[in-house]
Amino acid sequence: MLEVKYITNDKGERTDVVMPLSDYLEILDEIEKLKVVDKRKGEELFTHSDVEKLLKSDE
């Protein structure tokens, strides 16, 4: 679970978040991975056996 603290304005509305840098960097990494997945979602998929055949043919 993330350890976050909220900063609020004088109306009690959350305006900012404070969290450990390591958690923040982990979130950024996950976002980047999701961007790659989204970008590649239309690409052709290969089965494991197809990849093995391709690798063996390069030997």
Image: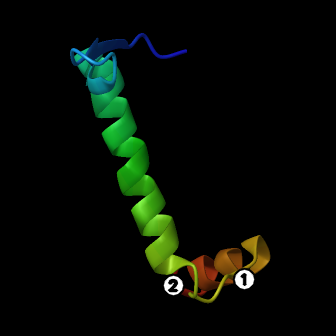
Amino acid, disc 2: Asp
Residue 44 in percent (x, y) is at 62, 89
The image quadrant that residue 6 belongs to is top left
Amino acid, disc 1: Asp
Q: Along the horizontal axis of the image, is 11 left or right of 51?
A: left
Residue 42 in percent (x, y) is at 58, 87
Crowd tier of the residue under label 1, counting other residues whose Cα lies within 10 Å: few below 14, some 14–19, many 20 or above:
few
Residue 28 in percent (x, y) is at 32, 42
Viewer-proximal residue, 34 or 49?
34
Q: Does 6 sit above or below residue 51?
A: above
Residue at x-position 35% and y-position 43%: 29
- Residue 30's label in the rendered image is none
Residue 43 in percent (x, y) is at 56, 87
- Residue 50's label in the rendered image is 1
Disc 2 is placed on an element classified as: loop
Viewer-proximal residue, 3 or 16?
16
Viewer-proximal residue, 18 or 55?
18
Residue at x-position 67% and y-position 82%: 45
Residue at x-position 55% and y-position 15%: 1
Ranked by sequence position, the earlier of labels 2 and 1 is 1
Q: Does 10 sit above or below residue 40?
A: above
Crowd tier of the residue under label 2, counting other residues whose Cα lies within 10 Å: few below 14, some 14–19, many 20 or above:
few
- Residue 58's label in the rendered image is 2
Viewer-proximal residue, 33 or 5?
5
Distance (Cα) linking label 2 and label 1: 13 Å
Disc 1 is placed on an element classified as: helix
Asked if the residues shown at circle 2 and circle 1 are in contact, with their CB atoms under 8 angstroms apart, the answer is: no
